[in-house]
Amino acid sequence: MLLQFIDEASPGILRYRLDLGDLYPNGKGRARFEARWPDFAASTADHGDLFTREADAIVYRTESFLPREQDGRTPVLLVLGNPASHSVRAGMCFASEKGKHTEHRFWRALAAADWLCFDDASAAPAEDVEVRNARRRADLLAGRYESPLLVGIDLFFTFPSPASTSEWAGVSGLVKLFGRPAMRLIATAERTRLAATIARFMTGQGAVVAFQKDAYEGLRGQSAPPYTFADACAGRLRSRSAAGCPVPLFGVPPTRLARTQMFRGVLMEYGDAIAGTGRSSRPLP
């Protein structure tokens, strides 16, 4: 099996096995990957114990924050491109701004759009970032936050990469590491995994929201508009299905723009569409 779930190492932190033999059926592609692996692995100290090399596989840690129980609120699955290595090691997505201890812009944007607001009233004035992340992780998994939505967070590509090392950062860093043919195989396996996640998480209502180009393209229906940056920023990326599941999919701008009014405005419009309040009248393609 190309991609295999192993276990949940700790709350929200999962382990997967990627089979390199299935990924590279010929020696040429595998040789290119092996030549690049040492530089990728050494690109940040955060990689630490995230990866374990086996003879013909890589075991790695990733993240997935799905509520443990349904509570009657509309379920919404936020799908990111791939996890940042430092966040996986911290045990919480968007653990902080890279190199700082400040709250990540993503959480502020969700709060501003009324999608998810943590109750920080009981937190100490100078709360340690590790304490904050542990508290918020527990609240995210338990659904303890102010929101009309029940929010789950998952990834299109589960394999981590550095957040700010330009050579290996994000999904583009994975493309450089694995190569495009291998990434297409991984994307197919990840889409299958996400289809099962969506089927479990959705209860006849709800929506999926993709925050990255590959996530939207990998999940959208055939008749939905293809991804463009302009359409993402204008709130024009909508699909009637997500990974073949009969739930709507919305494509939003990348999280690097989370400080902007544009980003928050798109979230607010889609939030209204998901909740059915009718402020947005655009039909789904």
Image (cartoon, grey):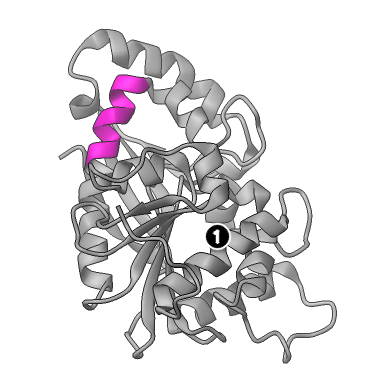
Q: Is residue 46 above or below residue 74?
A: above
Residue 280 image offset from top left, x and y in percent: 47, 68
* Numbered disc total: 1
Q: Residue at x 37, y 38 (%)?
A: 226
Figure check: 281 above or below 114: above
Q: Residue furthest left?
A: 1
Q: Position of residue 272 (x, y in %)?
A: 48, 74
Q: Indicate whether 230 appears above or below 281.
A: above
Q: Is residue 127 left or right of residue 250?
A: right
Q: Nearer the viewer, residue 22 or 109?
A: 109
Question: In the rendered image, which quarter is residue 29 located in?
Answer: top left
Q: Residue at x 71, y 49 (%)?
A: 98
**Residue 96 visible in the displayed image:** no
Instruction: Tell which of 210 and 261 is nearer to you.
Output: 261
Where's residue 225, x and y in %? 35, 42
Task: Give the labeled residue for mark 1.
Answer: 93
Q: Secondary structure at mark 1?
A: loop
- Whether 187 is among the magenta residues is yes
Would you call the spot at circle 1 few (<14 residues within 10 Å), some (14-19), or many (20 or more)? Answer: many
Q: Point out residue 122 in the picture as x, y percentages from the top left corner.
A: 72, 91
Main secondary structure type of the part rendered in magenta: helix
Check disc 1 and give the amino acid type. Answer: Cys
Residue 28 image-quadrant placement: top left
Q: Which residue sits at x=55%, y=50%? A: 234
Q: Is residue 16 magenta?
A: no
Identify the magenta region.
180-188
| Residue in front for this viewpoint, 200 or 249 | 249
Q: Quarter of the image holding residue 223? A: top left
Residue 4 appears anywhere in the view: yes
